[in-house]
Structure formats: structure tokens, C-alpha cells
Image (tube, rainbow, N blue to C red):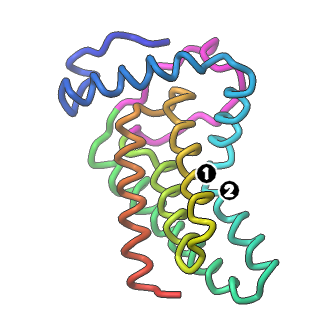
Amino acid sequence: MTAAATVDDAPFGPGVAAFDAAVDRALDRLRGHPAADRVFYTASTLGDWSLLWHLIGLARAAVHPAWRRDELRLSTVLVIESLAVNQGVKRLFKRRRPAVEADDRPLKLRTPTTTSFPSGHASAAFCAAVLLSDGDRALAPLWYGLATVVALSRPYARDHHASDTVAGALLGFTIGQVATRLWPR
């Protein structure tokens, strides 16, 4: 359900509210298409607790012993990132999530318990993309592509405003960059 933004719904100003509304309208063109619903709802579910990223790290470690340390670094950094974003940054902003009606969701999703800004899914996704790409540039487009799908899944499913995902992606990218410098391969 897309509603007109009010001043209370635009804590970051009218420009951000207009951006959020424009992205929501664009996503409305995809919503309801079975393939798009399946892709984005699956991506959102796999993004819960960074499950997708932990599974990728474990699979890589199982395939190549040299990636075992990378998996440990990935999982450790994602735990730290999650605590910082979900228990730290989100508590500073307390932004309300978009209103979602029961009939707005064709597929079931976990109901988030934290506030909306920034998106923890987007933050974890881009943090993971940085870490997975470190030392494996050939697969960087895959990792960033997956991160983008996970991030977009959140406004698609109306769990986040688009600006939440942009902020989360930037925050996660930054955390990933810092992590690669503090904990090199």
C-alpha cells in the first residue's frame, strides 16, 4: 500500500521522501509478478541474520581450504556489523517502517522487530560483498549483484524505505572496507 508522505513520514526531509516515493512507485510495477515476488522475497528471507552470506562463506571454505580464514573473518565481521547497525545505529534514528497491509504481501516474511533506518539487510549485504570480493575480484560482480538484490528486496517487500537501503548499503560498504584494512586476508 503506497501512501502519500506526510511530514511525520519524512524525517530526513522532502527530498528523501520524494526519492522514497519514486522508488516505491517504480517497484509497484514489479510487485505482484510471480517471478519478481519469488526472487525478492527469497532474497529477503535469505538475508535474515545474514544467512546467505554465512552459507556462501561456509561453501567457499568447504571447497578450498585457503578460504577457511576468510570465512572466519566474514562471519566475525558480520556479527560485529549486525550488532553495530541493529543495536547501535537503528536506536539513534528510530524511523518507522513503511505501513504494510496483510494483502500487500503475496509471500510470507519474518516481521522485523527493529526500526527502519538503516537497512540491516543492505548493510550486511554490502559488507559481505566487500569481504567476499577481497582477494577474489573475478567474482566481485556476483557478490555485489547479490547484495543489490538483497538490498532491493527490502523496499520491494515494503519492510524498508528506499533511503534506508541506500544508507544501509553505504554503511555496510564502509564497514567492509574498514574491516579489510583492520583484518587483511
Identity, as a three-letter code, of the amino acid under mark 2: Leu
Residue at the image point whose x is 67% and y is 65% from the top: 54
Marks 2 and 1: CB-CB under 8 Å? yes
Of labels 2 and 1, earlier in sequence is 2
Q: Nearer the viewer, residue 5 or 110?
A: 5
Residue for point 57% across, 28% down: 157
Front-lying residue, 137 or 109: 137
- The three-letter amino acid code for the residue at tag 1 is Leu
Circle 1: is it few (<14), some (14-19), or many (20+) Cα within 10 Å?
Answer: some
Q: Which residue is mark 2?
A: 52
Q: In the image, is residue 146 above or below residue 100? A: below
Measured as percent of width and height from the top left, residue 4 is found at 33, 10
Q: Which residue is mark 1?
A: 146
Q: Is residue 127 left or right of residue 96?
A: right
In percent of width and height, residue 52 lies at 68, 56
In 3D space, how far apart are the residues under numbered discs 2 and 1 (Cα atoms)?
9 Å
Q: Which residues are magenta?
A: 96-116
User: x, y (%) of residue 177?
Assistant: 39, 72
114 to 22, vertically: above or below: below
Q: Residues within 10 Å of mark 2 (few under 14, many from 20)?
A: many
Which secondary structure lies at badge 1? helix
Q: Judge from the rendering whether residue 4 lies leftward or rightward of residue 103; answer left or right.
A: left
- For mark 2, give the secondary structure: helix
The image quadrant of residue 172 is bottom left
What main secondary structure does the magenta stretch of the protein show? Answer: loop
Residue ID at (67%, 28%) = 36
Residue furthest front as drawn: 138
